[in-house]
Amino acid sequence: MTDIRMQQNKQSDPAKAPDFTGSLVPARPFWQQLKMLTNPPLFFEKLIARYGDYVRYRGVVNFHLVNHPALVGRVLRETHRNFDKATPIYHRFRNAFGDGLVTVEGERWKKRRKLIQPVFKGSAIEDFFSLMRDAAHSAVDAWPTNTVFNIADEMDHLALTVAGRSFFGRAFDDSSEDIRRWTDVINRYCALPPLSIISNPKVPTPMNLKLRGVLGEYDQFLGRLIRERTEGFANDDLLGILLDTMDEETGEGLDPKDLAEEVLGMLIAGHETTGKALTWIWYELNRHPEVEKALREEIETVTGGGPLKVEHLKELRKITMVIEETLRLHPPAWFENRNTLEEVELGGEVLPKGTMVVFSRYSLQRHPDFWMDPEMFKPERFDPEDAENAGNRHASVPFGGGPRVCIGRHFAMMEIKVVVATVLRHFQVVVDSSDQHEMCARMTMAPRYGLRVHLTRREQKQQADPGLS
Ligand code: HEM
C-alpha cells in the first residue's frame, strides 16, 4: 500500500506549525464580497489559492483564514483555551437553540461536557443499535422501486427519525410532523447569512417570527415530556438518560431549561449533518461501482447473510473507510470559526483579542500538500492497517478535534454504517440521469437539488424472511 493517505510534500511537516507571515487581503468591492455568501467554500478556496494557507482578510467581515493542519491543530487543541465561540455564526446558533454544548463556553461548557460525555461513549450508544436498524428497515420497506425519488430528502428524514426516537422514544412518533416542522424552521434560520440585522431575533422579520413560534411550541412539548418523566414515567431514551445524569462529585444534574436547550441543540447538530453524510455516500458509491461491490461483499461476509448485529459493526472496515473518505471530501459541517479571547500567537503572528479565526474543512481536507490526488475518492487512504500512511490527524477533521470534538461522532458513525449496510442489502441505488449536481454550502454542505435516484430491489434469500436483514 502506498502513500495515498498523507501527502508527501517534502517542505510541509503536517505536525509543525510553519511560521507564516500571513497575507493581508485588501478589501474587495462590496459586490465581490457577496460571493462569500453565494458560494462560501469556493470563495475561501480562491483566497487560499491566491494568498496561501494563512490569510488576513479585511472586508465587510474581518477574519484570519487558516488552511494548514498545524494551525488548525493549534486553534482546536494546543491553544484552545485562548479561543471562544463569540462569533456571528455561533450567536446565530445561540438564538436558535440556546446554550447547549454546541454553543456554551468556559466553565459551563466544561461541566456540561463532563456530565454528558459518558452518555455518548462508544459502548453506551450501542443500546441505540436496534432502534437505528429498525428505522432503516421501515424506511427501505416503504421506498418505491419504479420511480425516481430524492434520496437526499429520505436521508434527512431518516436521520431525524433516528435522532428523534433516540431522544424522545415513542413521543417522537406522536409528534413527528411537528418536530420536523420545528427543525426545518430552525435549520433555515441557521442557514441565513450571518448579518446581524436579520439574525437579531428581536427584529420582527417573517423568519424571526416563525422561529419564535416554533421555539415556543418546542418548549411546551419538552416541558410536558419532562413533567411526565419526573412524575414517574421513566424512560430509557436519551431524554430519560440525560434527566437522570448527575455529576458524581457534585450530585448536580441538568435543570429543565438546560435540558431543553441541550436536547434541541443536539437534535439540530446531529440530524442534518448525518443526513448529508449519507447522501454524499450514495453520490460517491454511484460513481465508484467497484467500491459499492466491495461493500456488498463485506456485508455478506461479515453477517454470513444473516441479520446485521451490533457486533458486526466493527468488522465493517470497508464501510468505515468509505464513510471517512466521504466525510473528507464532503464534510457536512464544512466551516469552523472561533474568536480569540486574548492575545494569542498563531503561525508567528500575535493575534489581538477579538480576532475571528476561520477554516474551511472543504479546503483543508482537500489540501494538495497533505493528500495525494486530493479530489479523488479513495477510501483506502483510511485503511487503519496502513501504518505508513497513518498521519496527520488534523488533515481531516470532519468531527472537529481537541476538547470540543463532536460528542455524537460514535452515534453518527454507527447510524451511518447501519443505514448503508441496510440499504445496500436491499437495493441497487442508481443516480438518475435527470440529477443536476451542484454543491451548496450553508450551515451544512449538500447537493443543492438533493440526489435523484432510482432503486432496483436486489433479489435476496432473506427477502422471504423479514427477520433476516
Ligand atoms: C456526520 C455527522 C456529524 C458531523 C459531521 C458532526 C460534526 C461536528 C463538528 C465538526 C463539531 C465540532 C464543532 C467545533 O469545533 O466546535 C461537532 C460538535 C458537536 N456535535 Fe456533531 N457532528 C455529527 C453528528 C452529531 C450527532 C449525531 C450529535 C448528537 C447526537 C452531535 C452533537 C454534537 C454536539 C453536542 C457538539 C458540540 C460538542 C462540544 O462543543 O462539546 N453531532 N459536530
Image (cartoon, rainbow, N blue to C red):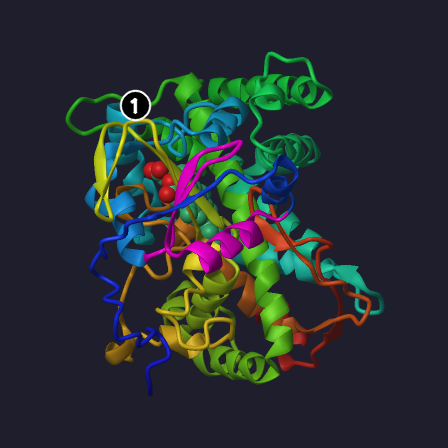
Q: Residue at x 54, y 26 (%)?
A: 96
Q: Quadrant of residue 112 in the image?
A: top left
Q: How many marks?
A: 1
Q: Quadrant of residue 358 in the image?
A: top left
Ligand 1's quadrant: top left
> Compared to 335, does 235 lie above or below?
above
The span shown in magenta is 39-68
Give residue 164's position: percent from left, percent from top: 56, 40
Q: Nearer the viewer, residue 456 or 391?
A: 391
Q: Quadrant of residue 185 in the image?
A: top right
Q: Residue at x 35, y 69 (%)?
A: 370
Q: Which residue is mark 1?
A: 253
Q: Nearer the viewer, residue 131 or 453?
A: 453
Residue 310 covered by magenta stretch: no
> Compared to 82, does 401 lie above or below?
below
Give residue 165's position: percent from left, percent from top: 55, 41
Give residue 124's position: percent from left, percent from top: 33, 48
